[in-house]
Image (spheres, helix red, strand yellow):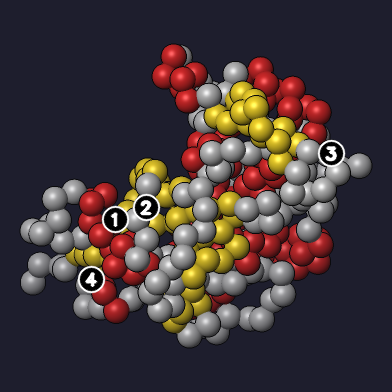
Amino acid sequence: MTPRVVIGLSAAIVAVTEEAPYVVVTRETGEMAGLPFGPFDPAGDRTLELSLRGWVREQTSFEIGYAEQLYTFGDRGREAPLPETRGADRLISISYLALTPSRATLHRAGARWRSWYDFFPWEDWRLGRPAAIDAAIGPPLRAWAEGAGDANTAARRWARARLAFALDGAVWNEERVLDRYELLYEAGLAPEAARDRGGAAPARRGLGEPMISDHRRILATAMGRLRAKIKYRPVIFELAPDLFTLLHLQRLVEAIAGLELHKQNFRRLLERTGLVEGAGQFDARAGGRPAELYRCRRETLAERPVGGVHVPAPRWD
């Protein structure tokens, strides 16, 4: 009998406020959330992206704008069955990143916006190094490394853990979101690992909420992609309102990167790009001296290749 293979389409739909980046979740299975997801119909769907947009519309009542393909996953044993894929021998999961400038009202039961830091709390360094890294992540990773069968494997494991989670003086790299999640999964610390191996997940504080199937891995991929992309493409303006203060734009970048940035450095580097211009208006809603409003110079995007918004070295003082 020919194995039944299902192609699944999933979307990490991101909107950002000064508080946090938010993603749409559309279902709750037990205590776990999931991303918008649906199977691709080879006979009825003209393209993968059109199929995805249809699934998102059906599950959220929301029309996505900017979207790009992220990655294709197909690891056996990590695609926990969903109602749409029961009976499949294999699931090939094609993921997308979609951006929107505001959290639209979602008119479908179960669809809501959630901070991506609910699922990855160790990724938010805006208030300093998260306590969970040294309390809930570092010690079990060290035990996992030391439990390897030989000294070389133990050394390699610890080197990976050290670089991923900035342990023992290593430098934090905010783009390595997927590396960190995959390391937790391999070490058996992510609840999804116990689920996929047929066991009960131990209760560990600080390791974030699990998600259905491989959706937390997909979200980690989206986070790393967006954190990298804001540096070399002007996608931050897909997430910002038409008019914004420079402080608001900085707060959006900080929310995505999970880092606190130096105000003067951020503004100086932003002005060098030629991507923003004064709108001749001021925002007095915050009280005190009104802040000048800016807009994205769309003509700059048409004139020449344009990079992204440089993320300066974070402030720790």
* Residue under pointer 3: 289
State the CA–CA distance, disc 4 to disc 3: 63 Å
Q: Amino acid at mark 3?
A: Arg
Q: Nearer the viewer, residue 206 or 111?
A: 111
- x and y percentages locating residue 179 in the rendered image: 57, 50
- Name which quarter of the figure residue 289 lies in: top right
- Tell whether label 2 touches label 1 (CB within 8 Å): yes
State the CA–CA distance, disc 4 to disc 2: 31 Å
What is the quadrant of the C terminus in the image?
A: top right
The crowding category of the residue bearing disc 2, from other C-alpha atoms within 10 Å (few below 14, some 14 to 19, many at least 20), is: some
* Residue under pointer 4: 89
- x and y percentages locating residue 73 in the rendered image: 36, 55
* Residue under pointer 2: 64
Q: Amino acid at mark 1?
A: Arg
Q: Is residue 106 above or below residue 248?
A: below
Judge whether residue 174 can be spotted in this image.
Answer: no
Per the rendering, the mark at residue 184 is: none
